């Protein structure tokens, strides 16, 4: 595509009026902004996050819309409403500008696509419908109370992939490089770099996540489609957010015009990243156009132009049967998931982060973006696999053995876009109960082996402590820990630090204790 | 050795042992030099400075160009008033004293139990120590070194390299109760220089504490008892569990400092098993008679 463009310039002359040369800078700006916010989604020891990737989840009408539909409650966060308002207004007015100029996932696709040799790849004109059908599925599933858009929404997918896979892998690489520098008897350099970056760029702890491989692989495969099949394959055929924005922008006033000089050379058609330019003006698909304005540049006759005109609704033929099938599939998926035995009743023992909505509402509103897992200072928030049922895939659960819930930390609630995890005040957090620690007396060292150990008591953060000592009067056995259920908040630090190998001898079970 | 030479050496030694002490301490307290100074009074900076001065000043412990590691207790995400961490103003003053004594670098660090970034920040230590001229650093995983201890409780354990390799190490504990170790004082503070799965030390906790204290051997211990936590330790969390004592203890004998601090809680040194064990191991003496210099502001 690039060679074609240069060729065009040479023959057709420079197009001074074209806005399209600003597009890469605009894309880069938003990609960097996204990464800046993503990396800033960390506490750094403070009570509040300085910045948060939440903004990008806030502005996503697919995520917010399906969550609202499934939960039957409109977003109330003013920042969400404002961000949504801007995106919807721009889209209604101008079309899929977001896809072509803003979306960080789209930018990544463009970047990876530029590695592809020999043009954008053959178009698959009939596949464009797939994304609409996916959208219909999501909407109907949401209508029946199942929120599935978050599995494939580009912003959720990207945030989740960065959190669970890309960022941890980057940290791993950076640490191993420092190890190498260290090993190459350049200890001073490694220490200097390590100290300088620790706590800012490099986290204190290597982030580790279950399913990192699967999530990372999915991202890799989607990006690889750019090279293997065609450029922006995801955006053209699969992206449900793109489909929604396309529909929202159907009546936009930004139109593509083709003047008389067109000799149907189809260069614009081949170079179109959205598959929207189909020869003459009448065949232009407004919903597919990402407003890159590239066809304006490509046209050797200078016949293509973009301008404002009275909106007309072009025909969008998705096929009535296909749409109906998708809608039914969405509804059926919701029904099938709903008739699964709830995870909680088959002993699903996973803890939700503090401030989480009741499980039913949580599953409907969690965007599975992983922002809470990114910000969690101990790394204890992990993506669920089937612990919370099929529906709970990639939703956050606290796994104390990986990391406990810091007693005064309220970061996860601060970065949650939909309020699936409510923002707690410091005071609320101190007594917010997510579970109850239960001592396994068959494994606990003082109980089972008469060995002295009171780590759980030492680390218990409540005042007075929820884990107390029981001393045998006159006996020679070591004191034993005991959980006062009315004080335990279920933070799991006892489980995290329990020195018993393998499964801890104290385990936090979800839900409040009997005293609550 | 010639008789003449012997006499000369003896004279020189007694002069060395006697004269500088008089000069430095500014008061004669008998032939034995005080190795424990206790200062009561506020503010914490002045008490800290006075206690160290009473031992001969920081120049006795830190020389020009030294790389010093200062190890406060920064174990918990608690504000200074709760007494769970060393008082930031005590830490800052010790950093300042080291800088005044000509230290090239004063590194302040701990291996906290709770999230390190929260602990460093909310303890107030990160900011106070940095402002006093210290380098506040987080411990790096790769800088722990497995040390063969063949000790009472530990065969070998990862210990932070900076602590092992510093020219001078200064221990800066806070005094508080502890469910497992009775009290956490100076020697117990060395668990914050250890890496690995520290919970596993608890099987032979007192022995392990002594092993670490035998290994690290600080040039100086400055124990913060400006306020002590008397219940719900080592984390506390309620101001009702904190007693204000306005006391700073400085010493060179790790056992003596802890023995003195135990008395602040109304305990005998032998009530704290690791103190007695440390004396048995030859690390120092619990007996305080004639060794303590009391000052008040």
Image: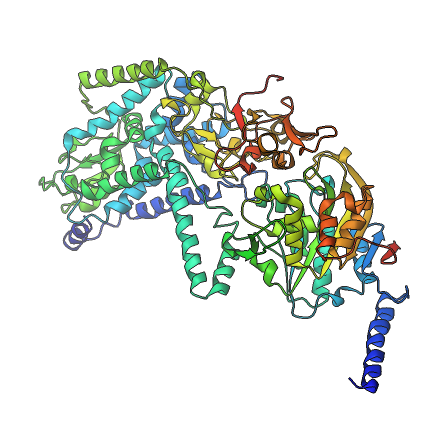
Q: Nearer the viewer, residue B66 or A75?
A: B66
Count the labels in the image.
0
Quarter occupied by residue B254: bottom right
Residue drawn 28% across the image and 20% down it: A137
Considering only vertical position in the picture, is A297 above or below B220? above
Residue B157 drawn at (x, y percent): 56, 52
Q: Is residue B176 left or right of residue A431?
A: right
Residue drawn 55% across the image and 31% down it: A492
Q: Decide if residue B226 is in sight here.
A: no
Q: Decide if residue A483 is in sight here.
A: yes
Residue drawn 81% across the image and 81% down it: B9
Residue B74 drawn at (x, y percent): 65, 47
Q: Is residue A216 left or right of residue A435?
A: left
Quarter occupied by residue B67: bottom right
- Specify the quadrant that holds the C terminus of chain A: top right
Q: Nearer the viewer, residue B250 or A40?
A: B250
Considering only vertical position in the picture, is B172 above or below A258? below
Q: Nearer the viewer, residue A32 or B226?
A: B226
Q: Is residue A405 left or right of residue B275?
A: left
Which coloring applies here?
rainbow
Q: Nearer the viewer, residue A263 or A118?
A: A118
Residue A19 drawn at (x, y percent): 29, 45
Residue A95 drawn at (x, y percent): 30, 32
């Amino acid at each position: 595509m690039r060679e074609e463009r240069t060729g065009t310039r040479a023959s057709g002359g420079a197009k001074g009026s074209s806005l399209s040369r600003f597009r890469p800078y605009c894309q880069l700006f938003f990609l960097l902004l996204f990464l800046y916010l993503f990396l800033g989604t960390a506490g750094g020891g403070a009570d509040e996050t300085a910045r948060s990737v939440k903004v990008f989840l806030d502005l996503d009408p697919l995520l917010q819309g399906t969550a609202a539909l499934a939960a039957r409650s409109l977003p109330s966060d003013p920042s969400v409403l404002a961000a949504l308002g801007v995106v919807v207004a721009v889209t209604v007015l101008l079309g899929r500008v977001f896809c072509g100029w803003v979306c960080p996932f789209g930018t990544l696709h463009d970047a990876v696509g530029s590695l592809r040799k020999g043009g954008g790849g053959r178009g698959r004109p009939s596949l464009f419908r797939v994304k609409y059908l996916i959208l219909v599925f999501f909407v109907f599933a949401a209508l029946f109370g199942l929120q599935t858009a978050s599995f494939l929404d580009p912003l959720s997918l990207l945030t989740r992939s960065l959190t669970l896979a890309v960022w941890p892998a980057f940290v791993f690489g950076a640490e191993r490089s420092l190890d190498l520098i260290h090993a190459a008897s350049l200890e001073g350099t490694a220490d200097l770099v390590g100290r300088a970056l620790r706590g800012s760029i490099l986290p204190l702890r290597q982030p580790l996540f279950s399913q990192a491989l699967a999530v990372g692989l999915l991202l890799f495969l989607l990006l690889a489609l750019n090279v293997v099949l065609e450029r922006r394959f995801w955006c053209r055929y699969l992206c449900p957010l793109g489909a929604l924005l396309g529909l929202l922008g159907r009546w936009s006033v930004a139109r593509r015009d083709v003047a008389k000089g067109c000799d149907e050379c189809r260069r614009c058609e081949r170079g179109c990243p959205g598959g929207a330019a189909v020869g003459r003006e009448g065949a232009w698909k407004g919903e597919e156009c990402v407003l890159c304005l590239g066809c304006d540049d490509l046209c050797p006759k200078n016949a293509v132009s973009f301008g404002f005109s009275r909106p007309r609704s072009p025909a969008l033929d998705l096929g009535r049967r296909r749409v109906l099938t998708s809608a039914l599939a969405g509804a059926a998926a919701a029904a099938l998931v709903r008739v699964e035995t709830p995870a909680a009743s088959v002993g699903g023992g996973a803890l939700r982060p503090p401030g989480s909505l009741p499980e039913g509402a949580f599953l409907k509103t969690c965007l599975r973006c992983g922002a809470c897992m990114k910000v969690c200072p101990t790394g204890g928030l992990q993506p669920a696999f089937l612990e919370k049922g099929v529906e709970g895939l990639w939703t956050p659960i606290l796994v104390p053995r990986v990391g406990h819930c810091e007693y005064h930390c309220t970061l996860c609630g601060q970065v949650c876009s939909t309020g699936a995890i409510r923002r707690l005040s410091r005071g609320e957090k101190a007594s917010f109960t997510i579970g109850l620690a239960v001592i396994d007396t068959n494994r606990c060292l003082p109980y089972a082996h008469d060995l002295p150990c009171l780590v759980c008591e030492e680390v218990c953060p409540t005042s007075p402590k929820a884990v107390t000592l029981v001393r045998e009067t006159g006996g020679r056995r070591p004191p034993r820990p005991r959980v006062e259920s009315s004080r335990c908040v279920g933070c799991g630090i006892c489980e995290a630090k329990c020195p018993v190998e393998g499964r801890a001898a104290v385990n936090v079970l979800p839900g409040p204790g009997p005293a609550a | 050795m010639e008789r003449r030479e012997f006499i000369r050496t003896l004279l020189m030694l007694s002069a060395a042992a006697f004269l500088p002490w008089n000069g430095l301490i500014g008061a004669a307290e008998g032939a034995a030099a005080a190795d424990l100074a206790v200062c009561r009074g506020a503010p914490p900076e002045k008490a800290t400075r006075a206690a160290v001065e009473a031992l001969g000043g920081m120049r006795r412990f830190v020389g020009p160009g030294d790389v010093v590691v200062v190890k406060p207790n920064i174990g918990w995400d608690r504000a200074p008033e709760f007494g769970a961490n060393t008082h930031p103003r005590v830490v800052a003053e010790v950093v300042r004293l080291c800088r005044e004594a000509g230290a090239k670098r004063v590194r302040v660090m701990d291996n906290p139990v709770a999230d390190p970034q929260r602990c460093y920040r909310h303890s107030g230590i990160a900011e106070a120590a940095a402002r006093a001229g210290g380098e506040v650093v987080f411990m790096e995983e790769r800088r722990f070194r497995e040390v063969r201890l063949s000790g009472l409780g530990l065969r070998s354990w990862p210990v932070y390299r900076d602590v092992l390799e510093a020219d001078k190490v200064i221990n800066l504990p806070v005094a508080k109760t502890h469910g497992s170790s009775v009290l956490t004082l100076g020697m117990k503070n060395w668990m914050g220089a250890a890496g690995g799965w520290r919970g596993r030390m608890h099987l032979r906790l007192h022995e392990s504490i002594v092993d670490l204290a035998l290994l690290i051997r600080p040039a100086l211990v400055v124990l913060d008892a400006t306020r002590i936590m008397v219940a719900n330790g080592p984390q506390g969390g309620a101001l009702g569990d904190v007693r204000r004592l306005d006391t700073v203890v400085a010493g060179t004998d790790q056992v003596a400092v802890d023995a003195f601090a135990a008395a602040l809680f109304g305990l005998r040194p032998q009530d704290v098993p690791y103190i007695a064990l440390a004396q048995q191991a030859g690390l120092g003496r619990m007996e305080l008679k004639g060794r303590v210099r009391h000052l008040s502001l």
